[in-house]
Image (cartoon, rainbow, N blue to C red):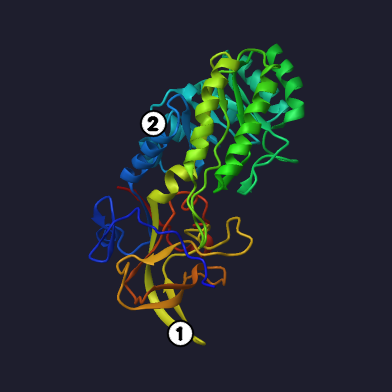
């Protein structure tokens, strides 16, 4: 029985055996970084992914971008013109979102532990605050009185169910995120007593899911829960954000998510939600699905060595630049991201090799025992699926190596 392999990575064309990004050879882009590792994002692929979603999903559905997946200002600015809104998880991300010129009420601010100064900044700007607790609700109301403003708020709900088959579960059981669904009715009654502008609900169960069946089942439960909670709302729901969870194939054996069953179900539900909730708009919120496949992490081979029968390609990049690809960002058992020698994509001669970084730790691995083209010092190594949770989640200062660059082309 053969080992599982990655699904084909064909989003970037190949010319003269070199990857093209934005129509340019990757070697040419690398030259502007003088050998320093970097991330490169293809704006045309970002647009294409959104166009594909728009074509598949019902037209009335709102599609929001969760910028924690990739908060690079140029990426956020590009997607702000394509999405129906932005979701942020810190005041820093909120400033990036506001700098795009998007209307403040199309920006939502989620995340537990918001400080009073963050609430003050968000309320002054007019963004919608996803309330994560009763205490946060009370503090937001006090800040509103202090500023003479009426805070825009939504309630983030922690459902009793979870998104099955998801890589990271954000709902179900005890969680730091949101308000347990059984506590929400009482919270909504109190919200109605405060001078708060209620916008709706945010119910997000999990992420990185490749099972359309699981996503549809979670959306069904989420919408039914929203109907039940809306009966306790002080004013009609305006936006009902059911989260996302759409995954991309990262590891050998994984298959691409089938959008058709999800789109079919949402086409029925969008109109129903508007009818039952007095014109409420149904929204999904996606991060990784929008940006991951449009990005590459690129580093350079600096040494080639053999150790007890295995080949090691030592590069100037690694876990300090791309923690997720090294297997140290949520993986229980380490698995390889798709990795290629970028200037020898198909390559004549191939071998099984380990691609490692320059750090003094055995955790610094970009590819373990992977079949790739034979590489030598000076060749470029590219890690696919790197447009999300790459640059911003990595410990750049670990061992004081230079930080990677970033560019949108």
Mark yes or no: residue 111 visible: no
* Marks 1 & 2, CB-CB < 8 Å contact: no
- On the image, the x and y values in percent for residue 296 come to 39, 56
Few, some or many C-alpha atoms within 10 Å of disc 2 (few <14, some 14-19, many ≥20)?
Answer: some
Few, some or many C-alpha atoms within 10 Å of disc 1 (few <14, some 14-19, many ≥20)?
Answer: few
Residue 298 position by quadrant? bottom left
Quadrant the N terminus occupies: bottom right
Q: Which residue is mark 2?
A: 100
Q: Which residue is mark 1?
A: 306
- On the image, the x and y values in percent for residue 77 come to 37, 36
Q: Earlier in the sequence, mark 1 or mark 2?
A: 2
The residue located at (55%, 43%) in the rendering is 212
The residue located at (66%, 36%) in the rendering is 113
* 323 in relation to 160, above or below: below
Q: Secondary structure at mark 1?
A: strand
| Disc 1 to disc 2, C-alpha distance | 50 Å
Of the pair 175 and 372, the residue shown nearer to us: 372
């Amino acid at each position: 029985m053969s080992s599982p392999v990655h699904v084909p990575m064909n989003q970037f064309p190949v010319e003269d055996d070199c990857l093209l990004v934005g129509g340019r050879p990757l070697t040419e882009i690398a030259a502007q970084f003088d050998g320093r590792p970097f991330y490169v994002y293809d704006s045309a692929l970002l647009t294409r992914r959104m166009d594909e979603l728009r074509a598949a999903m019902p037209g009335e559905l709102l599609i929001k971008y969760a910028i924690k997946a990739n908060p690079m200002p140029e990426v956020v600015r590009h997607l702000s013109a394509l999405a129906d809104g932005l979701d942020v998880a810190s005041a820093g991300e909120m400033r990036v979102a506001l700098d795009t010129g998007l209307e403040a009420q199309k920006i939502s601010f989620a995340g537990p532990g918001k400080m009073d100064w963050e609430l003050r900044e968000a309320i002054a700007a007019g963004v919608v605050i996803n309330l994560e607790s009763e205490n946060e609700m009370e503090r937001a109301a006090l800040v509103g009185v202090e500023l003479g403003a009426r805070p825009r708020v939504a309630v983030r709900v922690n459902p009793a169910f979870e998104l099955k088959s998801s890589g990271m579960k954000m709902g179900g059981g005890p969680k730091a995120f949101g308000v347990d669904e059984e506590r929400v009715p009482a919270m909504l009654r109190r919200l109605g007593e405060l001078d708060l502008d209620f916008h709706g609900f945010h119910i997000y169960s999990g992420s990185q899911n490749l099972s359309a069946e699981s996503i549809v089942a979670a959306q069904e439960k989420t919408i039914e829960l929203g109907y039940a909670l809306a009966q306790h709302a002080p004013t009609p729901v305006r936006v009902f954000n059911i989260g996302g969870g759409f995954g991309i194939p990262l590891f050998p054996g994984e298959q691409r998510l089938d959008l058709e069953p999800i789109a079919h179900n949402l086409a029925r539900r969008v109109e129903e939600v508007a009818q039952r909730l007095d014109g409420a708009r149904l929204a999904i919120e996606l991060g990784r699905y929008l940006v991951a496949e449009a990005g590459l992490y690129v580093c350079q081979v600096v040494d080639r060595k053999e150790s007890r029968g295995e080949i090691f390609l030592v590069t100037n990049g690694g876990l300090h630049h791309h923690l997720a690809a090294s297997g140290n960002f949520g993986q229980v058992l380490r698995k390889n991201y798709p990795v290629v020698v970028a200037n020898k994509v198909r390559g004549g001669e191939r071998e099984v090799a380990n691609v490692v970084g320059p750090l003094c730790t055995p955790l610094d691995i970009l590819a373990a025992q992977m079949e790739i083209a034979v590489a030598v010092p000076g060749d470029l190594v590219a890690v696919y699926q790197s447009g999300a949770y790459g640059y911003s989640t990595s410990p750049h200062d670990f061992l004081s190596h230079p930080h990677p660059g970033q560019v949108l082309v």
